[in-house]
Amino acid sequence: MQPAEIFVSIAAYRDPQLAATLADCIGKAHFPDRLRFGICRQRDPGDGAFAHAADARVRLLEVDWRESHGPCWARAQIMRMWRGEPWYLQIDSHSRFAPGWDDSLITMLQHCPGEKSILSSYPAPFAPGHEENLAGGPLRIAMVGFTRDGLPQLRPEWITPPANGLPVPARFLAAGFIFAPGSFVTDVPYDPELYFMGEETTLTVRAYSQGYDLYHPAKTVIWHDYTRTGAIRHWDDHRTDAPELIPWHEHDRRSRKKVLQILQGEPVTSCGLGQSRSLLQYEEYAGVSFRHRIIQNYTLRGDPPPNPRPAPDWRKSTHRWIVKLEFSRQQMHAQALQDPEHWAVSIRDHQSTLIHQEEFPAEQLLPLQQAGDRLALVCEFYSETEPVNWLICPRSRSQGQLAQISGQFQEDDVAQLAADEPADAGISTTPEEQLAI
């Protein structure tokens, strides 16, 4: 009996790893002849021919990088190449595979109890080179907070492989690794109007609302190069100083607006929610409220979904906090102030549960260079429990990750606010200290 075909979606933006990814995917499959590739190769006209262009399994769309509208747009073009293959795999163009990955994914998905199930996670990391170390995993996708404009923030976390080897329930999908029935292509078509931030969350709620159940694989079958030293991203090329191109932030601005519309249940003209389940059902399953920008502590702890049914007034027991992280200039590595890339802030409660995570970009940190000896950051967030301690992990452009610093909140560093109270109530800060507001 001929094994069922797998349609493999690969969006590549000026990526020199594309050919290696394709070769590894084919070389590690148990049944390479059943693979069908849809590839959107966003390239420079001076680039050479694609090494696998003549392969009968490859459906190739080549696009001048100047004509690209971003990763979601590219994935949407690829979905148009699907020809009814029973299985759909979506990966990034800088991936590696475990031997027999195709059989492993099909077997795991067939062990999921629902008729419409999806396997997805952030793949484990690897570094490309002569000897590539493919180890680690599996991972789950955790929600750790919201951006300032209300978009969910996700991150990978290691999990202990279940003893029974079965997939584990998940709250979110990862765009760099999705394995699903081929029906996913028609039920949850990619939205070319989205750009990057919010891609995974909207894909998640749209799939869930179409009746799909979400799972993380029980073992690692795909690895991903997250560092990509020297790689060119879409936002590197499409800048404001390139007047002939649409700046990436214009794509991003329109995309974020639509993401918020979907996550707040507002109607959209295309690629909206399905009819099998409601947005509220997803929020109860995952333990979040997108409109109120709050997350249940059960979710923050990483306990498995579905969440226990909360009290009807659970949103009222989730409080709004504003906190000040104060430290001396001497505590922080000098390079973190001289050429900051970003600082990652984590805040935990008395049980060491992570209740908020936020990333401060360089433009918000530069004013600290002119401040005095005492420095401070300010965060505002929602939590069911009181913030107790904080951790700052700084990263500089020239030296990378630097030594982290931590501290305990003092009584006057923490204020619990009413929903309609001004954000600066209860805490006295200088303009430099209010960078995070």
Image (tube, helix red, strand yellow):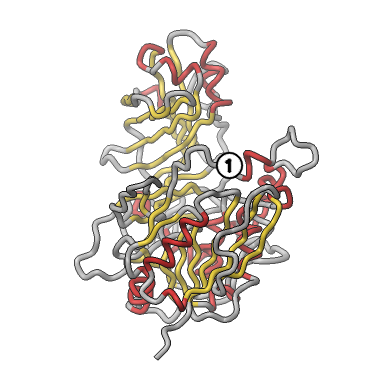
Q: Does residue 407 lie above or below 374 as drawn?
A: below
Q: Is residue 426 visible?
A: no
Q: Does residue 274 lie above or below 16 as drawn?
A: below
In the picture, measured across the screen, residue 89 lies left or right of residue 267, that is left
Q: Nearer the viewer, residue 296 or 276?
A: 276
Tell which residue pokes out farthest to the top in this image. Answer: 372
Q: Nearer the viewer, residue 110 or 309?
A: 110
Q: Does residue 381 lie above or below 394 as drawn?
A: below
The quadrant of the picture occupied by the N terminus is bottom left
Label 1 element class? loop
In the picture, measured across the screen, residue 270 lies left or right of residue 388, that is right
Tell which residue pokes out farthest to the right in this image. Answer: 244
In the picture, measured across the screen, residue 251 lies left or right of residue 11, that is right
The quadrant of the picture occupied by the C terminus is top right
Instruction: Classify residue 298 by image quadrant.
Output: bottom left
Instruction: Classify residue 110 by image quadrant.
Output: bottom left
Q: Is residue 136 visible?
A: yes
User: Residue at (21%, 70%) from the top-left corner?
Assistant: 164
Tell which residue pokes out farthest to the bottom in this image. Answer: 1
In the picture, measured across the screen, residue 102 lies left or right of residue 148, that is left
User: Residue at (45%, 49%) from the top-left corner?
Assistant: 154
| Spot occupied by residue 21 in the image (x, y as percentages of width and height) | 46, 58
Tell which residue pokes out farthest to the left in this image. Answer: 163
User: Residue at (63%, 72%) from the top-left corner?
Assistant: 81
Amino acid found under the numbered disc labelled 1: Ile
| Spot occupied by residue 290 in the image (x, y as percentages of width and height) | 53, 53
Residue on which disc 1 sits: 232
Q: Nearer the viewer, residue 247 or 294?
A: 247
